[in-house]
Amino acid sequence: MTEEYRAWMADPEINRYLESRFSEPTIESLREYVVGLRASSHSYLFGIFSKDGGSHFGNIKLGPVSNVHNSATIGLVLGNRAAWGQGIASEAIGALSRWGFIGLGLDKLTAGSYQSNAGSVRAFQKCGYAIEGVQRSQVRLNTGERDDVVLLGRVKADVLMERQ
């Protein structure tokens, strides 16, 4: 765990759409989170790095995986502002989605995004995710205003059709 990662998670601009923003991150709490996910049999956490491996842009998570429904949820954070607006989130979402569908054999992947986080919604849509619903006034922003949550999903059949 690095101080840079802790600083991302404490930065109000970076964490404004994360539920973790309600507690102050420490190196130890972040380490416990990562260690817990690494030990999990139903969630996977991956770092998002530059192609040369020199820069850590953020993290992407698949899970929890539901074995009953053969589905999982994706969440991500891009803490390095140099990665914003560069298509890096879409690339990571696409790669993790292919792995979830083809590597793990999942049938359905979902994600949720605050409506005001338009970049996140666009990144998932760019990867073939459809808006499946909107939870009106679901969350409170740091400003005290309410925001909707956009629910997105993609099914394995869509990916298999693309590969033909």
Image (tube, rainbow, N blue to C red):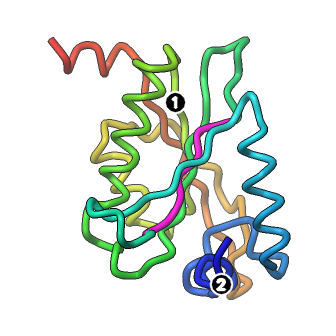
Give percent across and percent down for residue 16. 62, 77
Give percent across and percent down for residue 162. 20, 20
In the image, residue 156 sits, relative to residue 43, either above or below, namely: above
Q: Is residue 11 left or right of residue 155?
A: right
In the image, residue 137 sits, relative to residue 135, either above or below, namely: below
Give percent across and percent down for residue 26. 81, 79
Question: In the rendered image, which quarter is residue 89 located in?
Answer: bottom left
**Point 68% across, 80% down: residue:** 6
Q: Is residue 138 magenta?
A: no
The tally of labels here is 2
In the rendering, which numbered label is found on residue 109?
A: 1
Check the picture and name the quadrant holding the N terminus.
bottom right
Residue type at mark 2: give it. Answer: Glu
**Point 27% across, 63% down: residue:** 52
- Label 2 vs label 1, nearer the camera: 2
**What is the spatial separation of the Cα atoms under label 2 and label 1, in whole angstroms?**
32 Å
In the image, residue 144 sits, relative to residue 119, either above or below, namely: below
Q: Are marks 2 and 1 in contact (CB under 8 Å)?
A: no
In the rendering, which numbered label is found on residue 3?
A: 2
* Range of residues picked out in magenta: 57-63
Q: Label 1, secondary structure: give it.
A: strand
